Image (spheres, rainbow, N blue to C red):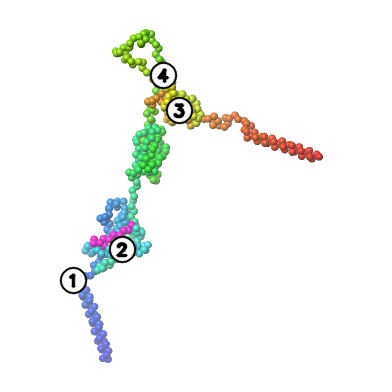
Amino acid sequence: MPNNRFVVFLTFLILINFISFVSSDMGGGGGGSSGGGSSPEPLSIGFTVEPPPSTNSTNQANATSESSSIGILCPENLLQIVIKSKDSKPVSDVEIRLILYEPYQGLKQQKVTDQDGKAVFNMSKELDGKYQLQFEKTGYLKPDDVFFDFVHCKVETPPPVLDLMIPDKTEVGKEFIAKATKDSKACDSCVIVVKDSTGKEVSRFTTDKNGEAKISLQNKGTYELDLLDDKGAIAKKKTISVAPAPEQEQPPKIEPQPVPAPSPSPGPSPSSEPAPSGGSGTPAGSGTPSAPVVLDLTTPEKIEVGKEFAAKATKDGQACSSCTIVVKDLSGNQVSSFTTDSNGEAKISLQNKGSYELDLLTSEGAIAKKNTVSVELALGSDELGNKSTSFLDDPTVQKGLGIIAIVVVFSAVYLWWRGQSGKK
């Protein structure tokens, strides 16, 4: 029985000592805390979209981010994190781990905050998905992990600026340059469409490496030139007025007629009496005024389509070398022009039927002589039925008939011979 009392007593002492130890430990911890001790301080996690000093904030004008709970700097795709204490002071040397949570790929990047409590992650090469941030610093309570969805910034690229430069006016048949630019630089391989006043496309041109296209319009009027973008839409349109060439604007002049030589008048010959040296008469040595130049043009009245003919120009009865002959259609539009050779001739060929006007121009560009030429289709080009050839005149038909005749003769001889053999 005494032994049992001893065991109970010993157990009681051990229990008292344990309770005393636990109470003293809890009391010491509370006193340290109330006296400004060293209990861990919780972190305050802050997220910001303010760009760092090296970031050009003007680049964010057309940038957007679709991240749901975290700030992303666009268009650079930068994730900036600020760590602060509970009294809003920056906390340095905080270790931050960036983990790709969905689709899970584990740790992607790891950063430590600087003296301003900042850490920047470049997300430009990371995948779109759900990410996890883990924070840790010795002496601080570990905050909860942060999850956020990341989608790369969508940067809207502004469309290129296209421009077209052409003259306001030009002349029929005269070549001019249309210049296209793309973002103020020469636009290589840009397409320029030419439309008439009804909106119908007349032609289209492609610019060279200098952004230029050489254009020539053959009829007068107002035209629209459209510069197309890469999708074929009209990016820029300009209007140009095409006027007739100067020689086409002048009205036809009356053909000059040769001036007959003056008939000799009775009276003393010029050599018998000296000419007056002054007064109101003709000045001495001026002589008779020179007669005007007489230009003439010789052409056939009718020709065939595509057949070459000679138009001959004369000047005072002599061959007119380097004279200009202009060919116009019924509408008065210039079709072509020719320059005569040393014999005063120009070889001309017209490809469409109809009536054409051939104008011989003076050295000033005025019309001195005009002729009309009728161009007709070549004989037999209209209808094959116009030919009067007979069926039997065809050599092929004649050859076939000869072969048939020979076969008939041989057949008759063979049948006769068989008949004779049967009688025997």
What residue lies at 39% left-to-right and 23% top-to-bottom? 253
Indicate the amino acid at tag 3.
Answer: Ala
Alpha carbon distance from label 1 to label 3: 120 Å
Which mark sits nearer the N-terminus, 2 or 4? Answer: 2
The residue where tag 2 is placed is: 110
Q: Position of residue 390 (x, y in %)?
A: 62, 30
Q: Amino acid under label 4?
A: Gln
The amino acid sitting under disc 1 is Gly
Report the disc number at residue 257.
4
Within 10 angstroms of label 4, few (less than 14), some, or many (20 or more) residues? few
In primary-sequence order, the first of circles 2 and 3 is 2
- Report the residue marked by disc 1: 35
Query: How far is the residue under mark 2 from the one under mark 4?
Result: 104 Å
Dot 1 or dot 4, earlier in sequence: 1
Query: Which corner quadrant holds the N terminus?
Result: bottom left
Q: What amino acid is labelled 2 in the image?
A: Gln
Is 363 in front, or is 212? 363
Q: Residue furthest front?
A: 271
